[in-house]
Amino acid sequence: MDPEGVPRQADVAPPRRALVLGGGGLVGMGYHAGALAALEEWGLDLAGSDVIVGTSAGSIMASYISSGWSGHDFYEYAHGRHPESERDEAAQQDQVRTIFTPLWNSRAERVRRGIGSTFAIVSARGYWHKAVRGRVPAGALRRIFPAGLYSTEETRFRLHQDLPERWPRDGVYICAADLYTGERVAFGAPGAPEATFPEAVRASTSIPGVFPPVRIGDRQYVDGGVVTATSLDLAVDAGCRSIVCVAPLGYRRDEGVDLRDPRLWSSMLVRSLFARTLRREVLAARAAEADVFVVRPWLTELKAHGTNSMRHFDRAALAASAREGTLRLLEANAGHPALDAATREGRATRPARG
């Protein structure tokens, strides 16, 4: 500090910065792979973010980043060049099939699970809580009508194999939702329930109605995307004033794209609710004086994304498209304060296109 009491530049702490990774299913993970690779090429220090928020598919990316993976690792994985990935398309299809291993052995059991899964969808959105004031359904009913159609055992095994049981660092928030209240829970945040790192991620990815809820402590949790696909507000509440958000379920309009093209309508409709929620979160963050930079697919990319985010797809092509689209976005916004704050050198550098 100088004699007049004015802080010198070296004494001024840089603003806390956050990386927010949104949901989007398997397709969203493919988009993240390309987008994160582009951000890293541009010079952004992903793992160096003070706060990393992950929801649903974004929770997987957040957990691996905080455990040592880079944007380049995700991109190589999508192309089948990473030691942990499958290059053969048939093997990739088998991986998707294992995610959807049925939990029923008879038609009657499927019907019972269907009823329980329908309840889970309704309850996760808070309707059950409002109707019964937080009462948990009787245990006998839960046993007769279990929620979830497909097993998460393969996911559980993979997460416990790849991730540490203990949280690798502070400032990693993994978002899930309480099945019976519909309230968001950010595991890893101050005051959140205790959870092992892999189980928090599994809870964040347990889509209600599709997969069983995950028991942590005495509560059941499901995919945090039922509350919001991004949870950008958590970064603001943590004091971050520089936020980079990757939102696979949003979209950005290209100049000259004809919105009357019917091939875009279904993808835009599926994303409309998520896009509105994202817009509200971004506006609220900016009102709190945070610099926010959002990476989301261009409309022209949505044709490849489709409407089913949990299907098999061409991982390499989608990741490559996401990388190119993100680099185009970065070039158009060079010098954005959120990008400058996130780079290792404190300024966004233009990488060579490859």
Image (cartoon, rainbow, N blue to C red):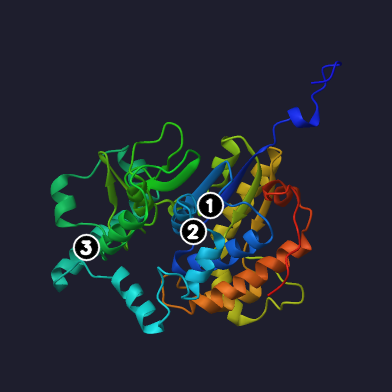
* Figure quadrant of residue 40: bottom right
Disc 3/disc 2 C-alpha distance (Å):
25 Å
Q: Is residue 199 above or below residue 210?
A: above
The residue located at (73%, 47%) in the rendering is 346
Mark number, residue 230: 1
Residue 313 left/right relative to 217? right
At label 1, counting other C-alpha atoms closer than 10 Å, the crowd grade (few under 14, some 14-19, many 20 or more) is many
Disc 1/disc 2 C-alpha distance (Å):
7 Å
Amino acid bearing label 1: Thr
The residue located at (16%, 73%) in the rendering is 107
Residue 328 left/right relative to 20? right
Q: Are marks 1 and 2 in contact (CB under 8 Å)?
A: yes
* Figure quadrant of residue 153: bottom left
Residue nearest the observer in this picture, 350 or 114: 350
Does label 3 or label 2 sit earlier along the sequence?
2
Q: Is residue 261 above or below residue 324?
A: below
Q: Is residue 65 above or below residue 251?
A: above
The residue located at (40%, 50%) in the rendering is 125
Amino acid bearing label 2: Gly
The residue located at (29%, 50%) in the rendering is 214
At label 3, counting other C-alpha atoms closer than 10 Å, the crowd grade (few under 14, some 14-19, many 20 or more) is many
Does label 3 or label 1 sit earlier along the sequence?
3
Amino acid bearing label 3: Arg
